[in-house]
Image (cartoon, coloured by chain):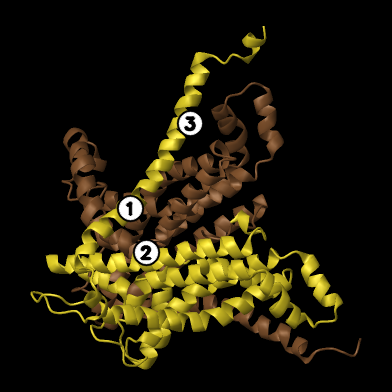
Chain colours: A yellow, B brown
Amino acid sequence: MIAQIGRISVKRRLIDRTMQAVIILSAIAAITPLVLIIGEAAVQGLPVLSFSFLINQPVPVGYQGGGIGPMIQGTLVMVLLATLISFPLGLCAGIFFSEWPNSRLALLSSFSNDVLAEFPSMVIGIFVYIIVVLATGTFSALAGGVALGIIMVPLVARTTEEGLKSVPPSVREASIALGIPRWKTVFYVVIRSARGMLVTGAILAVARAAGETAPLILTAGFSNAYVSGLLRPAGSIPYLIYYYGISPYQSWHAIAWGASLVLVMIIMTISLTLRLLVREKAGESGLKHR
Amino acid sequence: MQGNRSYGDLFFKPVLATMALTVIIILVSIAFELYSKSGASIQRFGLSFLWSSSWDVAKEEFGALPFIYGTLLTSAIALLIGLPVSLGVAILLSELMRGMARFTAVIGMFVELLASVPSVIYGLWGLFFLSPLVRTYVEVPLHKYLGFVPLFSSTPFGLDFFTAGILLSIMIIPTISSIAKGALEAVPAYQKEAMYALGATKWEVIAKAILPYAKSGIFAAAILGLARAVGETMAVTMVIGNQPSISASLFSGGYTLAAVIANQFTEATGSLYISSLIEIGLVLFLIALAINVSARAIILRVGYAKGMNMNV
């Protein structure tokens, strides 16, 4: 009798098994491209990779050697600039969202922030083209940095807000009870408890900015030389990949793959170290949810 | 103790409020600048810009329809392929592998890494790896045997709507699956347990108890995935073929709103040309805004907003 009750018809069992298999297959299908992309970048990129590739300037088609030094520098300069712009802005906005969550300003600003976060980066590129490139009369590292900065702001603000909200109220209450002013409580006590999550958010934003291409086309322009001033056009790794990738020259394709490998390695290193760091430092402080 | 107010607190709120206000100002000024700089084009073509299909630089005739068409078509393909796959990932992580922490962590990490690969590298890979593969193994057979269907009618070259759609579908998987996973995890346990108690199989529980319950969350995930597909630029630019044409065939080259800006902006001469490209940006802005607002509205209505509105 008991066996009878527990029995599931062959048809139902078959459907169950098939659908479970389909689900597992779809997850495999989702992961495969990542493996293929990394694999292809490694296979195509490794042959051109060398120390001189990382520091030399590009050479004209037909010449041997040449590297992507100026582009690495350009990317670093613009990402640094973007960080300087976006961190104070995003951090403060994020604190405001979590400190006064129900104020009209927070609701409106938080909504704008969400919209900006999902925005086509191209549109931000046009915006910065209008306000910086047209105003200064030249493509420049400055314009590129501003564009990347605007792209980073919503990410920084959002993770700050989430991070601060994950800190248990008791931490803040203990500090307030000691008579510590609110701003000190937030900056020295609450933020410190949410440190792990804030660092994660910050570095993810940096990684995102380092890979952006579209807005740079309209703002930073392109240059084969090392950046010598903020108001000069600046090359960047992503733009080089695009520019060389769609060119008709085989040797340029190889360089594009090499640059991709460099970029992927930079970004993967950032996100993997981050994962390990956060797991070790922050432990269980609400981070498990993400 | 009462008199012991810190001067810092006097500045605390105003400074933070200014920064919060700045975020709003950025969004508003993007809208304003795009609108004012597309003035020349808006004045010249009016609303017909939206449905004119001619994009003729020499004659200075500009219309956005081919780009709107390409954007919607590629995004639709992306969603058609990307949504089921992402749902599979979400179900696997939230249901089938519940409790297998190590497995889910590894798969979750892979999916997140997928999100962190820069768009331009997807483009490079799409151009040299995916496109020839899709052409040889999917497009050519489809064209050969089903060429009478308008969708597959033109000779496949590999750089077309179809390849762009497939590439986009890969790129939106992390967005959709992470939000859908949140929605699935929010399904209360009693909902599933009741179903299991009735003797249902795992799949029956998933199909009849979990998915219907998480419907709106999944819908929101799909819309945010759509938003991502619509705004994607570099990868699409590199594989879509870049021709302003409207064709029913998936195997013909096309263009998207974002791609035409990336491709033509720096070479554009003449104020009407540039103004038209900026108006394309304005159209993109409005489409993205509409998609975003509707997704937010759904998420707010559903209620489990927190943790869901963060994109990976």
First in residue order: circle 1 vs circle 2: 2
In the rendered structure, find residue B123 and report the number of the disc placed on it: none
User: Numbered disc 2: what chain?
Assistant: B
User: Do tag 1 and tag 3 residues touch (Cβ < 8 Å)?
Assistant: no
**Residue annotated with mark 2:** B118
Please, what secondary structure does the residue beneath circle 3 have?
helix
Residue drawn 38% across the image and 80% down it: A76
- Residue at mark 3 shares a chain with residue at mark 2: no
Please, what secondary structure does the residue beneath circle 2 have?
loop
Residue B80 in the image, given as x and y percentages of width and height: 40, 44
Q: CA distance from mark 1 to mark 3?
A: 26 Å
In the rendered structure, find residue A20 and report the number of the disc placed on it: 3
Residue drawn 29% across the image and 75% down it: B265
A117 and A197: which is toward the camera: A197
Residue B139 in the image, given as x and y percentages of width and height: 22, 42
- Name which residue type carries label 1: Leu
Relative to B250, is A169 on the left or the right? right
Residue B143 in the image, given as x and y percentages of width and height: 19, 39
Residue drawn 50% across the image and 65% down it: A274
Quadrant location, the N terminus of chain B: bottom right
Query: In front: mark 1 or mark 2?
Result: 2
- Residue at mark 1 shares a chain with residue at mark 2: yes
Mark 2 crowdedness (10 Å alpha carbons): few <14, some 14-19, many ≥20: many
User: Numbered disc 1: what chain?
Assistant: B
- Name which residue type carries label 3: Gln
- Name which residue type carries label 2: Pro
Q: CA distance from mark 3 to mark 2?
A: 32 Å
User: Numbered disc 3: what chain?
Assistant: A
- Total marks drawn? 3
- Residue at mark 1 shares a chain with residue at mark 3: no
**Residue annotated with mark 1:** B167
